[in-house]
Image (cartoon, rainbow, N blue to C red):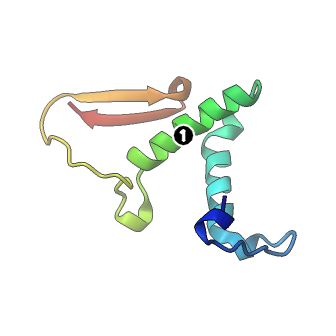
């Protein structure tokens, strides 16, 4: 895949997480915030958990480097009732005005 698009793959030394800090940070985040709370029953279940978490991570989870705004920020209404949207059996809850 990478050869077709003129990319070069840079291999990092074995057991050196500081050489790939972005990937290690992502793996740590998804493990702490999602996967450590479930017993995974197969590949399909794992794929479901990861896809639900990735959707949450990109659309609603606040990121401190972005002034606690989500990656895909869309302004919301300022008035209205407070509502709750939950995912992954209630592990992730997001409150919003709607």
Furthest-left residue in this view: 79
Residue at the image position 62 percent from the left and 57 percent from the top: 26
Image side of residue 7 versus residue 60, left or right: right
Look at 79% across and 74% down and name the residue there: 12
The x, y position of residue 49, in whole percent, is 61, 33
Quarter occupied by residue 96: top left
Measuring from the top left, give residue 65's x and y in whole percent.
Answer: 42, 67
Q: Residue furthest front?
A: 4
Against 42, residue 79 (above or below) is below
Residue at 68% across / 39% down in the picture? Answer: 35
Question: x, y percentage for residue 13?
Answer: 84, 75
Q: Where the N terminus falls, by quadrant?
A: bottom right
Q: Which residue is mark 1?
A: 53
Front residue of 90/11: it is: 11
Query: Quarter holding the C terminus?
Result: top left
Q: Assign a secondary structure to mark 1.
A: helix
Q: How many marks?
A: 1
Q: Determine if residue 60 is in view.
A: no
In the rendered image, the residue lying farthest to the right is 14
Is residue 91 found left or right of 59 in the rendered image? right
Image check: 21 left or right of 89?
Answer: right
From the top left corner, tell me how far across and down residue 20 is, in percent: 70, 71
Q: Is residue 86 left or right of residue 54?
A: left
Residue 23 to residue 11: above or below? above
Residue 64 in sight in this render: yes
- Name the residue: 66% across, 70% down: 21
Q: Residues within 10 Å of mark 1 (few under 14, many from 20)?
A: many
């Amino acid at each position: 895949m990478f050869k077709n698009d003129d990319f070069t793959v840079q291999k990092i030394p074995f057991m050196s997480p500081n050489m790939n800090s972005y990937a290690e940070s992502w793996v740590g985040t998804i493990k702490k915030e999602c996967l450590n709370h479930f017993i995974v029953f197969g590949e399909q279940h794992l794929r479901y958990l990861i896809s639900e978490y990735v959707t949450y991570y990109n659309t609603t989870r606040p990121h401190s480097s972005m002034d606690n705004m989500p990656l895909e920020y869309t302004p919301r209404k300022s008035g209205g009732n407070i509502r709750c949207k939950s995912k992954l059996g209630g592990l992730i809850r997001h409150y919003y005005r709607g």
